[in-house]
Amino acid sequence: MRLNKLLVAAGLGAFLAFSSAAHAEKTLFAQIGGEVKLRRTVDSFVEVMLADERINFAFANTDLGIFKRRLYDQLCEITDGPCTYKGRNMFEAHKKLDVTNAQFNALAEDLYKAFDRQGVPYRVQNKVMKLLAPMQADIVRKRTGQ
């Protein structure tokens, strides 16, 4: 009888340890708030970006519907959501543009504002930005004239 109790206790302990580890490993997509909150963030981002005179001119001829879908898919994929980004890589998408560091940084600030508007925790925002930061090398073409 004592052995049975010991086995049950060990099994319960293992289950609780597994459950808390699974909870701790929640995807970044889930930490953002899943599809609904990420879509709202993308919508807010476009609103903020279009109001930002530092960069809004760069999107004057952009199909914003396509832009939103691709941005959502890209953010969803890099945060381990259930999406697959099918757009061009960042180098190809930006190679004909003269994006400066200042413009790249302005866009990053606008994304922070959009996340704030949707109540995404700052620590989660920073995790997303850490994933996006390496893309700067493929996006920025003009290092001077910032």
Image (cartoon, rainbow, N blue to C red):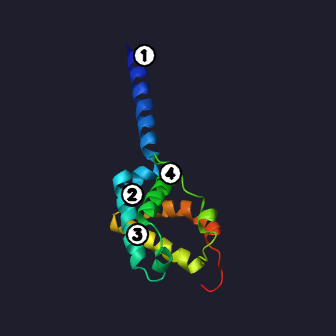
Task: Say whether marks 2 and 4 touch (CB < 8 Å).
Answer: no
Q: Which residue is painted at 42% across and 66% down in the image?
A: 64
Q: Which mark is residue 38?
A: 2
The tag earlier along the polypeptide, 3 or 1, is 1
The tag earlier along the polypeptide, 3 or 2, is 2
The tag earlier along the polypeptide, 4 or 3, is 3
Decide: few, some or many residues near mark 2? Use Cα within 10 Å; few <14, some 14-19, many ≥20.
many
- Looking at the image, which is closer to me, 48 or 26? 48
**Residue at numbered disc 1:** 3
Q: Amino acid at mark 4?
A: Glu
**Residue at numbered disc 4:** 77
Q: Is residue 92 above or below residue 50?
A: above
Q: CA distance from mark 3 to mark 2?
A: 12 Å
Decide: few, some or many residues near mark 4? Use Cα within 10 Å; few <14, some 14-19, many ≥20.
some
Foreground: disc 4 or disc 1 = 4
Foreground: disc 2 or disc 1 = 2
Decide: few, some or many residues near mark 1? Use Cα within 10 Å; few <14, some 14-19, many ≥20.
few
Foreground: disc 4 or disc 3 = 3
- Looking at the image, which is closer to me, 97 or 78? 97
Q: Which mark is residue 46?
A: 3
Res. 29 in view: yes
Q: Report the quarter where the N terminus lies.
A: top left
Q: CA distance from mark 2 to mark 4?
A: 11 Å
Q: Amino acid at mark 3?
A: Val
Rendering quarter of residue 22: top left
Rendering quarter of residue 96: bottom right
Q: Amino acid at mark 1?
A: Leu
Q: CA distance from mark 4 to mark 3?
A: 19 Å
Foreground: disc 3 or disc 2 = 3
Q: Which mark is residue 98?
A: none
